[in-house]
Image (spheres, rainbow, N blue to C red):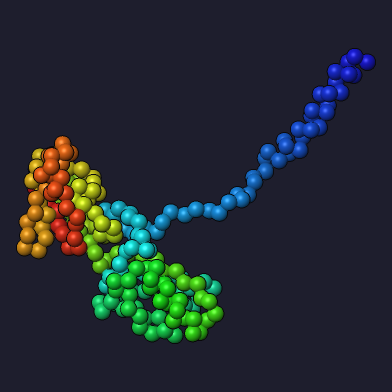
Amino acid sequence: MATANRIFPFVLIVLACSPAWGQAGKSVPATGPQVYDAPKVTTGENPTAQPVDPKSYQIGPEDVLRIEVFRDPDMTRTVNVRPDGKITMPLIGDLQAENLTPERLGAQIKEALSQFENNPQVDVSVLAVNSKSFAIIGRVNRVGKWPLVTPLRVFDALGLAGGFQDFANDKDIQIVRGNQRLHFNYRDFVKGKKEALDQNIWLQNGDTIVVK
């Protein structure tokens, strides 16, 4: 009888745990929404992804856009911004895209489509930035052309180049901007010297960074 008394609680424990053991081998579906990274674009010989902010990035000629119209595959398409800064959409015709943010362009497409559809849902994303770029050449590990997706300073741009090669002159890096030759002392910048801090300027479209 004593033995039975000892076995009986053990049996109860086994019966209580068995449903949990039965579920252990089964996968439980996720209950929360899946989170995706922000859209990114790459370009150049050795591309580096940069996020495109749909609220701030200004679309320019030759940019490649993806226009998604929910539940309307005939309107969903990839378009190139023409040199005149416009795109063409079915039913709507020509739309000005240059200097608009993706979010603003999406709102304009939605407004235009509202004449033909009831409450259309439109999303505009940038697949490739071709309208704004800068280049890095010379004694760096990764030369090439990069999209100027977000505001970028010289120091951060050099980080995309993967570091300097041997014997690179990091004390006099040049930024070619049209007829201008601007200078950046990388070595003094990392030491925190004020003059070099002032040299760490914002890049502009078409700038070329030269490391000799």
Relative to residue 212, is residue 131 drawn left or right?
right
Q: Quadrant of the N terminus?
A: top right
> x, y (%) of residue 77?
43, 74
Q: Is residue 80 above or below residue 177?
A: below
The residue at 22%/61% (across/down) is 133
Q: Is residue 59 above or below residue 193?
A: below
> x, y (%) of residue 19?
76, 38
Residue 158 visible in image: no
Q: Nearer the viewer, residue 26 or 40?
A: 40
Q: Residue furthest front?
A: 194
Q: Nearer the viewer, residue 189 or 135?
A: 189
Q: Residue furthest top?
A: 2
> x, y (%) of residue 46?
26, 53
Q: Nearer the viewer, residue 164 or 50?
A: 50
> x, y (%) of residue 4?
90, 19
Number of numbered markers: 0
Q: Nearer the viewer, residue 88 or 192?
A: 192
Q: Residue furthest right?
A: 1
Residue 133 visible in image: yes
The residue at 35%/56% (across/down) is 51
Relative to residue 119, is residue 151 drawn left or right?
left
Q: Is residue 43 above or below residue 184?
A: below
Q: Is residue 46 above or below residue 8?
A: below
The residue at 52%/81% (across/down) is 117
The residue at 25%/59% (across/down) is 148
